[in-house]
Amino acid sequence: MRDAAPNTVYLSDYTPFGFIVDSVALEFDLDPRHTRVKSRIAFRPNPDATDRRFFLHGENLRLISARIDGHDVTCTLTEEGLTCDVPDAPFIWEAEVEIAPIENTALEGLYMSNGMYCTQCEAEGFRKITYYPDRPDVMSVFTVTINGPHPVLLSNGNPVAATEHQAEWHDPWPKPAYLFALVAGDLVAHSDRFTTMNGREVDLNLYVRPGDEDKCAFGMQALKASMKWDEDVYGREYDLDLFNIVAVDDFNMGAMENKGLNIFNSSAVLASPQTSTDMNFERIEAIIAHEYFHNWTGNRITCRDWFQLCLKEGLTVFRDSQFTSDMRSAPVKRIADVIDLRARQFPEDQGPLSHPVRPESFQEINNFYTATVYEKGAEVIRMLKTLVGDEAYDRALALYFDRHDGQACTIEDWLKVFEDTTGRSLAQFKRWYSQAGTPRLKVSESWEDGILTLTFRQDTKPSAASPDPKPQIIPIATGLIGPDGEEVAETRILEMSEATQSFSFEGLARRPVPSILRGFSAPVMLEHDLSDADRTHLLAHDTDPFNRWESARTLARGSLLPMIHDGAGADPAFLDAIRKVVADDTLDPAYRALMLGLPTQSELAALIHAEGGTPMPEKIHAGVEAMRDAMAETFGDAAQRIRDTHLVSAPYDPGAEQAGQRSLANAMLSLITRRDGGAAAQAQFDSADNMTNQLAALAALLHIDRGSEALAAFEAQWKDDRLVMDKWFGLQVTQARPEEAASVAEALTDHPDFTWQTPNRFRAVFGALAMHHAGFHHASGKGYRLLADWLIRLDPKNPQTTARMCSAFQTWKRYDADRQALIAAELDRILSTPKLSRDTTEMLTRIRG
Ligand code: 0A1
Ligand code: ZN
């Protein structure tokens, strides 16, 4: 482990590498402690570069030998790599290094998981495998030989040759080192085929550990659907004879798009009705699509440097959200994406970690795989599409693939294809990439002589990352709903570019209610002073499903605040309006279930803070619980009727239709459980034949403290299934009472199956604790202390996962002085830990401020 060395990298310092890599040949002799890696790399001077210093990245490598053109060379080694003198002409570099994959607990580079070898090279993991210019703008063709006694030996590209203990792979597509992958182990394949649009046959394999074969079918279907969708919608065809996916239990993130050899966290690919919830299925489908779509947006066209990460991630998230909208319900997907954006990206953008979609500096790139780069990055592309129109978007994308195939690109290249396609300047639009913070959009209305004028003001709070924010281009999709509920103006895109700007709607007979920011057409915070009556009107009549839902959300917030602040009762008008939409059988059940959702407690804390108050987590918790109880009373027996209507009797299918029925039925179950002492939930738990219903019943029982027997039964049933046991660990914390959440988490750390070095298990417990707003922020400070203890323990083993989990503290300045003092003490305690990793040091220094 390297000592924290604040070594900031700046976008403005970019220079091309001094050499071109024409080919790379690697040979691996696998051994847990003594893996040997031989490399043979053809370099030649880069005519476009001025700096010809020869520096190869390398970390934790034992150099055995290094040669240039067959002659031994003397290298200068540092903790970060090596330098040596090289000829001013093409040359062959040959090196041999030794590494110890079994000791690699950071899960970057070559490591071991349950006896199998696997790799994770994005962003900078390849340098832990061999000496190399480990930067995304250095692209080359790789040939890989693997020697080892394992039945399955995989790398990127197409297989060239294989004998019993050796396999050779060749990837014809030039790629950066971060897309390199190797897998070796005792694995079984679930295989299928796909015929591409030009009639090429592609072999598809999903490799899993023996015993997991029955969890592959859904992932394979999702892969084939993704391949077909990318052909149909983007005209992108797959480009190798083989596409492999491997499931790995120990993985820091969701999955990785290595060329032709995607590696997945097993939680992001393995699925069966008995062990996975509907939400798991949907997430798996989306992640498979995401990684597959990277083949064009990321691999064929990659990033020049890591500052351009949003070039591949924003676009690929946007593409996977389009895919999910097409496969499932578009309005439900849009609402789910906005809920997620508000839960994860807004806090980032409003706190000390705020950074632009394209950051301009970093210390550790792993800390910038953020909701801002990914999800806001996708929102920016969505806005671009809204502004130029669908047809121009398609032409721009065709030009992008045509012009930049095989290149490592920048955001400038990306915007230029839109400028060249449309003839329009995107200079101001580019601020969405360079400016941090979430704009607030204030609207006021005036009404005169049949003209409705909407005046908008945009404001972005200055932050350390963007001290002087400028007005941005904001597409505001707006329609008008007349007093009788009819739509009097269809959606129009109001294109705002000034700090303050007005737009008029003329020729109106009666004053309408404006429906603003339809479909959440821009990632902003809208402030629109509508009366509750007008919002209820939109809730009943808006033709835009997103804004209909948004009206319910805003009414819920308005009703919750007095309950939180003064212990007031729930607003009967709100309850009545919600009951009406939820009981409306003409609406999609999934949408009705979303209507019942309330803002998260953390979102309410942010709202109270933004309004100048101090959020008290215990009061927020009590307010939300009181609202849920009031909902249970309001629905009364109707809850049972709605549930009965939506119980699924057909064999389980994870598709949107059944999943929607189950989400509504289970939302009703949670209301019923508040009134029937758990009878219905216990019955559902006892008879459930799928994980969605089993887990929903268990959650409902735990919530009313009647879950101990079910919990024990669940453990007995699933103790050998690690992915289900992650749910078991997490749910106990999620459903704990606030004053007990930290103790429950602590007790779980003593469980023999708390294998804390497995990121999934660590996150099951501590991710759940961090998400339990009132539990984590309990006034005792126990939640803060416990998380800090465990972050200190995990950091030397796995800095990346530790650093990501530090974001639990990012909102700390919202809270009262006592809580702030408790958190500050924990942040300082972690920061003073000797040899704290660069990852965690950077995160905590930024959070501490
Ligand atoms: N590119 C992957 C995400 C990913 C990033 C970093 C990783 O390890 C440091 C692993 C995966 C994706 O977007 O899916
Ligand atoms: Zn991605």
Image (spheres, rainbow, N blue to C red):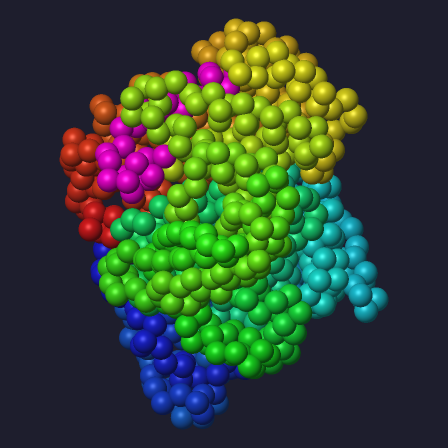
Vertical placement of residue 346 versus 634, above or below = below
Which is more toward the observer, 261 or 670? 670
On the picture, is 228 further left or further right than 744?
right
Q: Position of residue 325 (x, y in %)?
A: 65, 49
Total labels: the figure holds 0
Give the image location of residue 746, x and y in percent. Answer: 34, 24
The part of the chain drawn in magenta is 604-632
Q: Residue at x 43, y 76 (%)?
A: 427
Q: Residue at x 52, y 6 (%)?
A: 677
Q: Is residue 526 visible?
A: yes
Residue 517 inside the magenta-drawn segment: no
In this rendering, the answer to whether 51 lies above or below 612 is below
Outermost residue, front side: 449
Q: Nearer the viewer, residue 59 or 161?
A: 59
Q: Quadrant of residue 115?
A: top right
Judge from the rendering whether residue 435 lies leftward or rightward of residue 481; answer left or right: left
Residue 250 placement (x, y as % from top left): 49, 43
Among the 4 quarters of the image, the one containing residue 147: bottom right
Q: Nearer the viewer, residue 424 or 22?
A: 424
